[in-house]
Structures are given as C-alpha cells and as structure tokens.
Image (cartoon, rainbow, N blue to C red):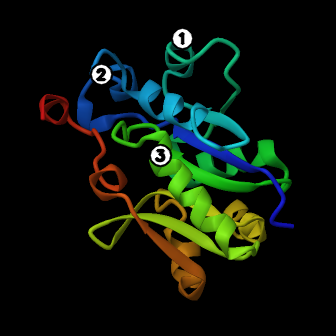
Amino acid sequence: MTGLPISGVILAAGQSTRMGARNKLLEVWKEKPLVRHVVDAALESELNHVVAVLGHEAAKVETVLPQNFPTFVNGDFANGMAGSIRAGLYRLQGLAHVMVLLGDMPLLSNDHINALISAFRKQDSDDCIVVATNQGEWGNPVLFGVQYFADLKLLEGDSGARSVMNAHREKIIEVEIGLAAAKDFDTPESFSN
C-alpha cells in the first residue's frame, strides 16, 4: 500500500492570539503573506495533493491562497489543533498517507518536504512516521503512514499529533532539516527577526 498518494494538510485555522488583533498568516514576510510560503512550498513539492484547513478569519486567509486552492473550514478551530487535523483527514477519507504542515513556518521549502517524502518511501511500509527535526528535536512537518489515520481522527485539544507519535516511537524516522522544522511566527517581533 505504500503506492498510495501522499497528501499534505496545511493547518491554517489558528487565532494568532499572541499577535494581538493581527492574523499572523496574513502578515507579509519576505514579500508575501506568511501562509503562502508554506502553501507554495507544498505545491512545488512531490506531495500528490494539498489542502489547507482554515478557521479563524477563513475568508480573509482564503483571499491570499492560490485561486481554486482546496480548503476546508474547521468550525471548531477555537478548541485547538486536533480539530483541524481531523478536518483535514476528513477530506482524505483514509485514502492517502498524510503530511501535516503548519501554516506559520515559512522557512520550510519544497526540498525539506521532499526529504521527508523520500525517507518515507525508502521504508516501503505504511506504518512509519517521518518527522522533521531541528538539532535532533522533533518539529514539523510530520508524515504519517495511512495506518495512523484512525489514531489521528481521535485526537483532541491543542496538542496536535504528538500523542500519536509518542505512542509509536519505535516507528519514527527523523529527518534533520534544521531551523525550518522549528521556526514559527507567533509574535509581531518574530517578523522582524
């Protein structure tokens, strides 16, 4: 079953609470809205399909995405990241492996995404999890084999998929991509660094 497609689910539903009244995904960094960096990297990668899960100010975020880019609105976005992961998985219906990407990590490139895909394909197995690391520390994105679809659909709260990863540590493959796996933009100051 490793011949299944690999789909990317970009989580872009958060409320940007540490940004005050501003939506960080719409803030311009290096000449384009923050979320577009991740979307463009995903579209330029070897992912077979990419969807963004929107929530907070969904209509505004959608205006900065490519025309006809597939989106899904998580109406329960205020209750944390898990709901957005579940919403993205709903679109896939268990028919693809899934890479979960965060919309606020603009250092991520298509080469980083492809490195995770390559590591996954080398395993020739549906039951591995490939995680990007920064100096050996787990970060994002994370690629889950289709076998973890049911576990991911049961996630709750704002912890993301870390609980699934912790429960299957023996199946994890780490791919070092450096700061791109860890650097997110959460405060107005982070945009000036």
- Give the x, y percent position of residue 58: 55, 22
Q: Name the amino acid, label 1.
A: Thr
- The residue labelled by disc 1 is 63
- Give the x, y percent position of residue 50: 67, 37
- Give the x, y percent position of residue 47: 66, 44
Q: Quadrant of residue 31?
A: top left
**SS of the residue under disc 3:** helix
The reply to whether the C-beta atoms of the residues labelled 3 and 2 are less than 8 Å apart is no
Residue plotted at (31% across, 20% down): 27
- The residue labelled by disc 3 is 111
Q: Counting residues from the N terminus, which is met first, the one under dot 3 or under dot 1?
A: 1
- The residue labelled by disc 2 is 22
Q: Nearer the viewer, residue 71 or 122?
A: 122
Q: Counting residues from the N terminus, which is met first, the one under dot 2 or under dot 1?
A: 2
Q: What is the number of callouts on the image?
A: 3
| Quadrant of the drawing holding the C terminus | top left
| Quadrant of the drawing holding the N terminus | bottom right
**SS of the residue under disc 2:** loop
Position of residue 3 in the picture relative to residue 34 (left or right):
right
Nearer the observer, disc 2 or disc 1?
1
158 w.r.t. 10: above or below: below
